[in-house]
Amino acid sequence: MFNRFYKKLDGWPARIIGLGLISLIAFYAFKTYDSVEAEKARLLSDLESAHSLQYDLIKQLQAKEGVINNFQGQIGQISSTVGTLEKLSQTDKELLKKYSKIYFLNENYIPATLTDIDEKYLLENSKNFMMHAKAWPYLRSLLEAAHREGINLLVASAYRSFGTQTVLKSGYNVTFGSGANAFSADQGYSEHQLGTALDFTTKKLGPAFSTFASEPAYKWLTDNAYKYGFILSYPENNGYYKFEPWHWRFVGIALAKTLRNENKYFYDLDQRDIDKYLINIFD
């Protein structure tokens, strides 16, 4: 385009003017290009600054979120601890104590709630037919399972008050003298007062259940009672009383399973290890 324009100019003056115009156009074109490049560089710099600022804001936001999440975690832990303490405060602390000749229950202790055991599972003419209301559903499940498998388990004795145990032990003392201490607890030391211990028998044996260990019912209990939270309190060679295959105590499924898996008995454990299971005894 400039060549055609240049050829139309006639003479040196005209050519000089054309060259000037061309130079002027080129100068403005260069200045415009330079200005565009400068603007481009400025915009790129602004964009980079914006990205840097955005990155800093994101890091600050993440840090704030970390603080908030940590705080929420602490609140959750505190709430969980409060809930645990509240649940523990509402659970009878006596239920997992090692009573036999160790801890003592005074004459005023009575389980918070007692309920009748279903009559169809009681030995005829049984006088001690109540147990801890929260333990009863576990016992009922155990008895139902046993009966479904043809094991006619019955309850010969369950909750016994301090006064009832006093009368019972006095009678044994009259009959057996000091020998009664080998199989009967003094008042205040009996697991029966907790309402979570009971003596089993069968229809065949009735109240004379001293041979219970030879019954299929005993074998069934040793294989299955832990599933329902029950344990044998006084196994063979225990240091408290003679072997009592009929006497079982509810300690909760978690502890019963632990004892089963570790091949241990309740009185083998330290009390502080037993207490860890108190909060979940009825779960």
Image (cartoon, rainbow, N blue to C red):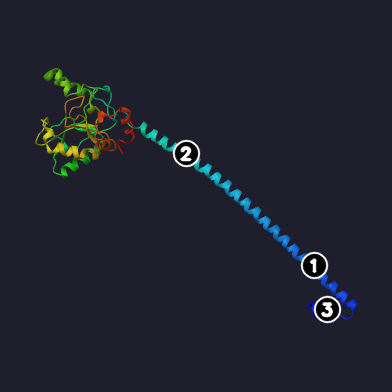
Q: What amino acid is found at the position of numbered circle 2 in the picture?
A: Ile
Side (left or right) of 273 relative to 117? right
Q: CA distance from mark 2 to mark 1?
A: 69 Å
Q: Residue at x 80, y 78 (%)?
A: 3
Instruction: Give percent across and percent down for residue 219.
Output: 15, 38
Q: What amino acid is found at the position of numbered circle 1 in the picture?
A: Tyr
Q: Quadrant of the N terminus?
A: bottom right
Quadrant of residue 21 in the image? bottom right
What residue does disc 3 label? 6
Instruction: Give percent across and percent down for residue 211.
Output: 11, 31
> Mark 3 falls on what kind of element?
helix
What residue does disc 2 label? 75
What residue does disc 1 label? 28
Q: Residue at x 16, y 42 (%)?
A: 147
Between marks 2 and 1 in the image, the one whose residue lies nearer the viewer = 1
Instruction: Give percent across and percent down for residue 118.
Output: 19, 38
